[in-house]
Amino acid sequence: MAIVEIDNIVRRFGQVTAVDHVSIDITEGEYVVFLGPSGCGKTTTLRLVAGLDVPDEGEIRIDGRVVASAASKVFVPPQRRNIGLVFQTYALWPHMNVFDNIAFGLDVQKRPRREIRERVAETLTYMQLDGLGERFPHELSGGQQQRVALARMLVARPKIYLMDEPLSNLDAKLRMEMRAELQRIHRDLGCTTIYVTHDQFEAIALGSRIIVMKDGKISQDGSARDVYERPANLFVARFVGNPPINLVEGELSVEEGRPWFHGDGLKVPADVPRSRMGARVLAAFRPEDVRVLDGAGRSDDDAPVLAGTVAARMMAGSNVIMYVDLPTGRDLRVICDKDVTYGVGDHLKFVVPKESVLFYEDAEDGVLIESEGRRERRTDA
């Protein structure tokens, strides 16, 4: 059973539709990440769930109870939704010490002082904040302030955790540490979490399920692996992945009884419906799937090969990213092992494994063209 049900909600600001008929069901214990660029509607959707905003259309239910309904004129305020919220800014009271910041929600609920002391002390230990209870926010590092903000949410023991880009103000090292911390919290507590971010790496690292949004609508709803390996459309394919996915324009045709893709020097077998033959499409493949071809030959006649000149080469941790100029004027992005010796100006050949190539309709946000085999498996399921 879904613990959060978002049913066909709409939110408008003047002539702008920030959330456009969005429906999402979230089951207990899920870690759902709303991912997308600025202005896509992810934060507005979170605010509607939290009760910080009111939908113009649709309904929201939490744990089976209607908390917002435009048609029925129902609105339950945030403090009665059993949710916890962590903001992009830490939102700590500067005149309160750490202990009082964490205890604030329990004070509002008029919990017994003994219970407050015990729960805050327990949460301080859990969040590795022992000994900092008497400090004030300005005496803490950014990472410690974020831990206090998380502790303030945890101590109230809400049913649902809502987080709006909580790590965006931290430096790269602290963000990595806090991602691990957030994973630990979810593993230990099994809490239902909705997390908003524009950072694709963060989304893939944290989310058991990712909802990619654009222009107030859902572009894809699936596992991190599906969103990365089988983007539902070109927007998701371009947005998720760094460096971005390679796209090659071309056409589908039949040769010797089997479908092929031809375009920009790339020829690859295409496992797509025969009804698509003759259509203009885009072939897509990730930079890490491209291999440098050693030697002049190739063992697999079906393995598509591209040739080009290395225009740029940069280190990226344990990998090297190469930008290659193709004769057609397009560029090819390739991720290699850090030990490769190829440099700028080298002319190389590259193999694109045929199983890694996806095909999309040639349109602004063209959808993925499913292979015949995959379509049949989905039908059988």
Image: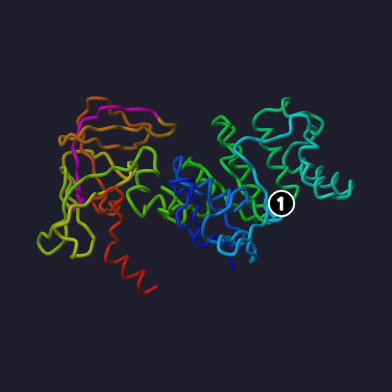
Q: Is residue 237 above or below residue 25?
A: above
x and y, in percent, of residue 347 in the image:
19, 30
151 falls in the magenta region: no
Query: Is 39 rendered above or below residue 270?
Result: above
Which residue is painted at 32% across and 41% down in the image? 287
Given residues 321 and 282, the one toward you in this image is 282
Secondary structure, mark 1, is helix
Q: Image quadrant of residue 337?
A: top left
Q: Is residue 80 above or below residue 95?
A: below
Colouring mode (rainbow / by chain / secondary structure / one colour): rainbow
Where is mark 1, residue-wise?
79
- Give the number of marks: 1
List x then y, in percent, for residue 221. Answer: 45, 56
Left or right: where 157 falls relative to 267: right
Q: Which residues are magenta?
A: 299-315
Quick one: quadrant of the N terminus? bottom right
Residue 85, x across and y down, in percent: 65, 46
The crowd level at tag 1 (other Cα within 10 Å; few <14, some 14-19, many 20+) is few
Inspect the magenta stretch and tell me whether residue 301 lies in it: yes
Taken as a whole, is the magenta stretch helix, strand or loop?
strand
81 horizontally vs 263: left or right: right
Taking the spot 74% from the left edge, 33% from the top edge, the residue there is 93
**Three-letter amino acid code at disc 1?**
Gln
Where residue 282 appears, as percent x and y from the top left, is 23, 49
Q: Residue furthest left?
A: 256
Near-viewer residue (364 or 289): 364
Quadrant into which the C terminus falls? bottom left
Q: Is residue 276 above or below residue 245?
A: below
